[in-house]
Image: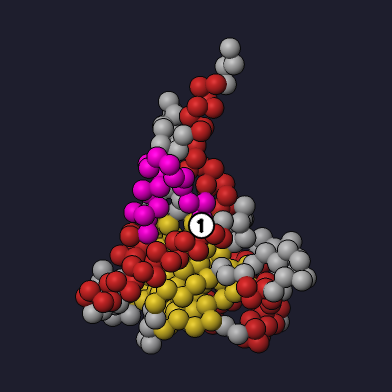
């Protein structure tokens, strides 16, 4: 009799715990995220910076069609890593939730509230028969209209992993090379967060460079900022990314 049969049985079911308390399908989903190109988020005094490295597999591929960062609402954006199709479905859920909140309550949804809702949705797929865990992780970033301190315009950053757990961060990475990038953040930001958005952009690009096999190329990068004062989401143009990379090299 094959001694691996019991192990395989637990491996096949995403709703069954193994004897040592593991859900193998969730762990495989995390592995899918770790194989994806990285996305990073950095909180600054002025807002939040999201940056991602896109995997351009061919010179014939139009890099602009690869979406790693998505605008959710005027004050919210999401970066992803892992299976792009799974991430796109979660982004659609986030947009619907944000718009329903505006219509129902007449105000923008809080960053933590959106992250928690997405985490609940993701977690349901780890315990529901006939479905599988999402093979994507998300960075939910934005300006909280009413944060824990009660201050307006508070920048927030949350990670939602394939298990359906939300974590709040000051700086974080998802995707390939996460351990190295987080180590970079811990060393670089030990004295505190970047005060200005431009410094946050530089820190995010430096973090992505730590896992790149060659120099960063502007067409393979996506950089967005969320401004605390204006509560707006802006995408950096190609020229602005080129200027930011040139500043790093100088």
On the image, the x and y values in percent for residue 46 come to 42, 81
Q: Does the stretch in magenta take in 54?
A: no
Q: State the residue position of label 1.
A: 86
Q: In the shown orientation, is residue 225 left or right of residue 167? A: right
Q: Magenta includes 130?
A: yes
Badge 1 element: helix
Q: Position of residue 116 (x, y in %)?
A: 33, 59
- Furthest-right residue in view? 59
Q: Residue at point 46% right, 45% down?
A: 132
Q: Nearer the viewer, residue 33 or 183?
A: 33
x and y, in percent, of residue 209 in the image: 66, 67
Colour pattern? secondary structure
10 Å crowding of disc 1: few (<14), some (14-19), many (20+): some
Q: Is residue 187 visible?
A: no
171 vs 63: above or below: above
The residue stretch that appears in magenta: 118-136
The residue under the point 58% across, 12% down is: 1
Q: Report the residue at 70% width, 67% height from top.
A: 56
Residue 82, percent from left and from top: 56, 56
Residue 18 seen by the camera:
yes
Residue 108 figure quarter = bottom left
Q: Nearer the viewer, residue 249 or 61?
A: 61
């Amino acid at each position: 009799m094959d001694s691996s049969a019991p192990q395989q049985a637990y491996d096949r079911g995403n709703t069954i715990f193994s004897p040592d308390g593991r859900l193998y399908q969730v762990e495989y989903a995390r592995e899918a995220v770790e194989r994806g190109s990285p996305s990073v988020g950095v909180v600054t005094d002025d807002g939040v910076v999201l940056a991602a490295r896109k995997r351009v597999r061919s010179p014939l591929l139009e890099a602009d069609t690869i979406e790693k960062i998505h605008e959710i609402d005027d004050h919210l954006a999401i970066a992803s890593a892992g299976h792009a199709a799974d991430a796109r479905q979660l982004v659609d859920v986030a947009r619907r939730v944000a718009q329903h909140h505006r219509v129902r309550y007449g105000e923008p949804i809080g960053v933590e509230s959106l992250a928690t809702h997405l985490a609940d949705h993701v977690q349901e797929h780890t315990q529901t028969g006939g479905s599988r865990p999402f093979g994507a992780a998300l960075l939910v970033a934005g300006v909280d209209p009413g944060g824990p301190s009660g201050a307006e315009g508070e920048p927030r950053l949350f990670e939602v992993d394939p298990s359906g757990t939300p974590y709040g961060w000051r700086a974080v990475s998802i995707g390939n090379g996460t351990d190295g990038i987080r180590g970079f953040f811990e060393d670089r930001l030990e004295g505190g967060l970047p005060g200005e958005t431009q410094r946050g952009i530089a820190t995010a690009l430096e973090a992505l460079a730590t896992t790149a096999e060659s120099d960063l190329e502007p067409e393979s990068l996506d950089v967005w900022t969320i401004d605390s004062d204006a509560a707006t989401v802006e995408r950096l143009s190609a020229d602005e990314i080129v200027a930011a990379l040139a500043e790093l090299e100088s």
